[in-house]
Amino acid sequence: MEKSLQERFAPESACFGCGPSNQKGLRIRSVVEGDEVVATWTPEKHHEAFPGMLNGGICGALLDCHSNWAAAWHLMKKHGASTPPCTVTADFHVKLKRPTPTDGPVQLRARVVESSDDRAVVEAELSAGGKVTATCRGTFVAVKEGHPAYHRWG
């Protein structure tokens, strides 16, 4: 199985959404596919808002972390670096379009639509059963030394 961005660049991360080392987290596995970052994630019963439907906050966490990795990957490639910068969420706006069923895996897709030297605007979507259930647009910023998230990948 191909290593995810998280497993390659932040194997010790304890982030709730995407940290490979957080046994109680969502453990999103984002991979690059062309100019997008994609992931497949399988919900469990304890992620539900009500029987058979994913909690909206979990939808937001999936979109936030996945989009953050799309931004980090983009900025790394843009600057020709060998590791991604530590990026944080400056803002993100989630639209819950329909309930997200939990009876099978969900898919995440994210792509950078704007960027500058230290930030990227990402658009992402969450889908289940072939239908888009939520979308997100967010700004993710590479932090500098002195910020609490600086070097958090290590």
Image (spheres, helix red, strand yellow):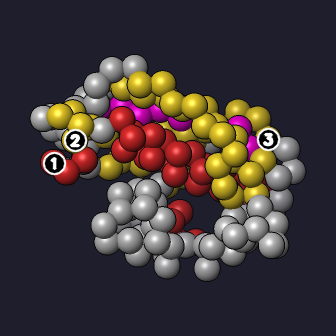
Task: Establish if 6 lies above or below 129.
Answer: below
For this view, does 146 lie left or right of residue 125? Answer: right
Task: Establish if 97 lies above or below 39.
Answer: above
Can I make out residue 62 in this image? Answer: yes
Q: Nearer the viewer, residue 32 or 151?
A: 151
Where are the magenta residues, as a range? Answer: 120-128
Q: How many marks?
A: 3
Residue 152 picture location, percent across and down = 63, 73
For this view, does 9 lie left or right of residue 48? Answer: right
- Mostly what secondary structure, the magenta segment? strand
Q: Nearer the viewer, residue 154 or 70?
A: 154
Q: Quadrant of residue 107?
A: top left
Residue displayed at 78% across by 47% down: 119
- Residue marked by disc 2: 48
Assign a secondary structure to mark 3.
Answer: strand
Can I make out residue 108 in this image? Answer: no
For this view, does 52 lie left or right of residue 17? Answer: left
Task: Establish if 59 lies above or below 130.
Answer: below
- Residue marked by disc 1: 45
For this view, does 128 lie left or right of residue 138? Answer: left
Assign a secondary structure to mark 1.
Answer: helix
- What amino acid does circle 3 point to? Ser
Q: Is residue 75 magenta?
A: no
Residue 38 picture location, percent across and down = 47, 46
- What amino acid does circle 1 point to? Lys
Mark number displayed over residue 115: 3
Residue displayed at 48% across by 24% down: 95
Residue sitting farthest toward the top: 97
